[in-house]
Amino acid sequence: MAHPLISKVKEIVSSKPVVIFMKGSPESPQCGFSAKSCEVLRAAGVTDLGSFDVLSDEAVRAAVKEYTQWQTIPQVFIHGQFIGGCDIVSEMYEKGELKKLLEK
Amino acid sequence: MSPEQIKNRIETLAPGTKVTIKDLTGTQNHYEATVISPVFEGRPTIEQHRMVFGTVESEVESGDVHALSLKTYTPEQYSNK
């Protein structure tokens, strides 16, 4: 059965071109991986980053994992599409794929 | 799980897959893997990572491997690095 909060996840995902589900906030991240992901997104030129603090809502945290079938936080979405966590975002930045995706 | 075991497992992904494993903590449960494989050609990074995780799914789920950090490349991307 689908998680009851999937629709809320979809709403958050579509609220901004780039959205991160993270621990803490971009200004005050509570985890090194969340912090690094925000840093990489900023380096790639993201100025208007949407974020959701999963520590503030355990149900949304479970729902986003169910939605993406990805078990770790942070999770980054670009134009509504799930991109990945810290490793993937960093790797895509290094390969130049992140900028390409953001320019679309 | 030993570095050798995890390397062998990931190499079952596809013929021609090359894997380098780094034990990040010396405790055989936090690893970094660099995976170069022709099977990654034309696939988004997220899918490349899902494919690799698929080969060690049971160990990650059981907690035998606590953390696996990944870098994935096609042979071409790797040689242009």
Image (cartoon, rainbow, N blue to C red):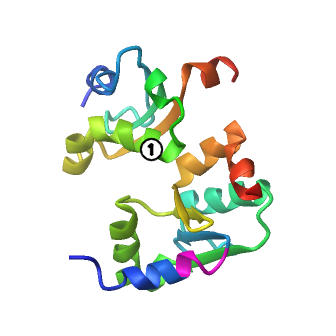
Q: Quadrant of residue A40?
A: bottom right
Q: Is residue B39 above or below residue A51?
A: above
Q: Nearer the viewer, residue A59 or A36?
A: A59
Residue A69 falls left or right of residue B47: left
Q: Which residues are magenta?
A: A12-16
* Percent position of residue A58, x then y: 37, 81
Quarter placement of the N terminus of chain A: bottom left
Element type at marker 1? helix
Q: Nearer the viewer, residue A72 or B41?
A: B41
Q: Which residue is located at x 33 percent, y 35 percent? A: B27
Main SS, magenta residues: loop
Tell me, yes or no, if residue B23 can be seen here: yes
**Front one among A19 and B5:** A19
Q: Quadrant of the C terminus of chain A?
A: bottom right
Identity of the residue drawn at 68% across and 37% down: A95
Occupied quadrant, residue A48? bottom right
Disc 1 crowd rating (10 Å Cα; few below 14, some 14-19, many 20+) is few
Residue holding disc 1: B47
Residue B37, can we see it?
A: no
Q: Residue at x 63, y 44 (%)?
A: A92
Tag count in the figure?
Answer: 1
Point out the residue furthest to the top here.
Answer: B16
- In the rendered structure, does residue A14 fall within the stretch colored magenta? yes
